Image (spheres, rainbow, N blue to C red):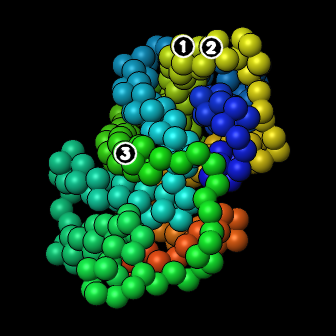
Amino acid sequence: MRYTRASVPADKLYLASTAVFISELLKTLVCLLVVYRLLPSQTRSIPNLITFLYCELIINWKETIKLAFPAILYLIQNNLQYVAATNLDAATFQVTYQFKILTTAFFSVVMLNRRLSNTKWAALGVLTIGIALVVLPKGALQSWMGYEPLIVSDTNATSIGNQSNSKGLVSVCIACILSGIAGVYFEKIVKSAQRNTSLDMLEKQKNTEQIQLWIRNIQLSIFSVLLGCIFVVALQDGPAILQDGFFQNYSYLTWIVIFIQAGGGLIVGFVVRYADNILKGFATSISIILSSVISIFLFNFEVTLSFSMGALLVIYATYMYGSST
């Protein structure tokens, strides 16, 4: 995502709103296909699928409307991710984005009454310290310690694209807060959803629980598609789309990012259903190492002492949380 946003001039950027919209549309189509495949083989047909979805989405509208709130939050969060990726290097973005683990833990305690052990709270504290070290200005830690800044990479390295670190960090912070609220709320709905009439008809089927999960994803994606189309694509970038087209400045890398975002969103649904949002956050921390290594070669990223210490603390916090019972 960072490479597709920062390696081109500002006037050649693709529209983040359209990328988010297509990603949500792809998730909806995949969910529809999976639900179709999970229907009983003897009754599997397009008309029966439409009838089934009508019962789930329209007749049981009270269950559907519950997904509007997290859909709005996810829509804003996804757009903020593109803003952050444009203004921060990939490694810093990945590490600071782990702040969502802390916000998710907080909202899990508040909204789900989940109790965390002392070790897990300590892991969250270590995570916070690690993120704080990552976002320190280059050379700040060495200056406080009385040493000269230690730079691992080429000192003449330059950044790519038009960046605003403050804008990127604010975007990350807001995205993390929204991610925590939306993720925990979605988890609560998925795990406590009442089984409705149409699902009771499939009670004898072993895939009933799987269908319920995919229905929740469809409900979430539909709101994201509709709201994204109206309020983000049309109102925010409508004039630009009318002038230069919906797919302006798209490349094959843009499509790769879209498919990755869509796939990641679907995987999150499984993690939330069979694990929890905090573990979901910790599971992504290994990407910090990969992003840092790739950034050195793609963006001439400077690995400072504070960044290295912070990244190691985030990884250690991941281990602490995962090993605690």
Measuring from the top left, give residue 226's x and y in whole percent. Answer: 55, 18
Q: In this orientation, which residue lies closer to the viewer: 87 or 267?
A: 87
Report how far apart the C-alphas of labels 2 and 1 lie in the structure: 5 Å
Q: Which quadrant: the C terminus?
A: bottom left
Residue 309 percent coordinates (x, y)? 39, 81
How crowded pointer 2 is (Cα within 10 Å; few <14, some 14-19, many 20+) is rated as: some
Say if 38 sits above or below 323 in the image: above
Q: Identify the secondary structure beneath mark 3.
A: helix
x, y percent for residue 6: 65, 48
Q: Is residue 72 visible?
A: yes
Which residue does the image show at 71% across and 50% down from the upper left?
A: 7
Which label sits in the foreground, 1 or 3?
A: 3
Residue 27, quarter of picture? top right
- Which of marks 3 and 1 precedes in the sequence? 3
Q: CA distance from mark 1 to mark 3?
A: 23 Å
From the viewer's perspective, is 246 left or right of 130? right
Q: Tell whether 160 sits left or right of 265.
A: right
- Residue located beneath label 1 in the image: 235
Q: How many marks?
A: 3
Query: In the image, which disc is placed on residue 121?
Result: none
Contact between marks 2 and 1 (CB within 8 A): the answer is yes
Q: Amino acid at mark 3?
A: Val
Which residue is situated farthest in the right direction here? Answer: 252
Question: Residue at label 2?
Answer: 238
Residue 133 versus residue 219 in the image, above or below:
below
- Give the residue type that dot 1 points to: Leu
Q: CA distance from mark 2 to mark 3?
A: 25 Å
Relative side of 111 to 43, left or right: left
Residue at x-position 54% and y-position 13%: 235
Residue under label 3: 170
| Residue 58 coordinates in the image, percent (x, y) | 49, 14
Are discs 1 and 3 less than 8 Å apart at CB?
no
